[in-house]
Amino acid sequence: MIPKNVDYLESYPNPKDKRKKLYKDTRSFIKGEYWQVHPVSYGKSGKTVNIVCPFCGNIHTHGNASGHRVSHCLQNDNPGYEIVL
């Protein structure tokens, strides 16, 4: 799910579970009200994309289309993000 040896992903320990990692995609940025996020990988069928959530650092899976999405984690009552393909 997570590509290896890419320069745009940074990993760090999950403070709640040191055995797991969280991620930051350095390509993500805020534009207006929403974060702009890029896929880090695609599902096997090509119908889904995996993104690094800018709110929680986990990987979320969404349908393979550009546009606004609601974050699966809903941390801090966030407004979601826009997927940029």
Image: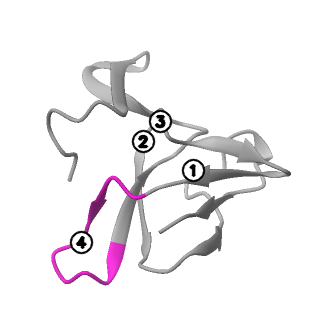
Q: Tag 1: residue type?
A: Cys
Residue 47 located within the stretch drawn in magenta: yes
Image quadrant assignment for residue 43: bottom left
> Is residue 40 toward the left or the right of residue 70 in the image?
left
Helix, strand or loop at disc 4?
loop
Q: Which span is picked out in magenta?
A: 39-48
Q: Tag 4: residue type?
A: Gly
> Label 3 crowding class (10 Å Cα cut-off): few <14, some 14-19, many 20+?
some
The residue lying at 22 percent from left, 46 percent from top is 2
Asked whether the beta carbons under mark 1 and mark 2 sit within 8 Å of each other, the answer is: yes
Asked whether the beta carbons under mark 4 and mark 3 sit within 8 Å of each other, the answer is: no
Determine which residue is flagged by label 1. 73
The residue lying at 42 percent from left, 41 percent from top is 58
Which of label 2 and label 4 is nearer to you? Answer: 4
Of helix, strand and loop, which mostly describes the magenta segment? Answer: loop
**Relative depth, front residue between 62 and 25:** 25
Determine which residue is flagged by label 3. 57
Cα–Cα span, label 1 and label 3: 10 Å
Instruction: Pinpoint residue 6: horizontal percent, then vertical percent.
Output: 23, 35
Q: Tag 3: residue type?
A: Gly
Question: In the rendering, which numbered label is found on residue 58?
Answer: 2
Image quadrant assignment for residue 10: top left
Cα–Cα span, label 1 and label 4: 20 Å
Q: How many marks?
A: 4
Residue 4 vs 46, above or below: the answer is above
Helix, strand or loop at disc 2?
loop
Asked whether the beta carbons under mark 2 and mark 4 sit within 8 Å of each other, the answer is: no
Q: Earlier in the sequence, mark 1 or mark 4?
A: 4
Question: In the rendering, which numbered label is found on residue 43?
Answer: 4
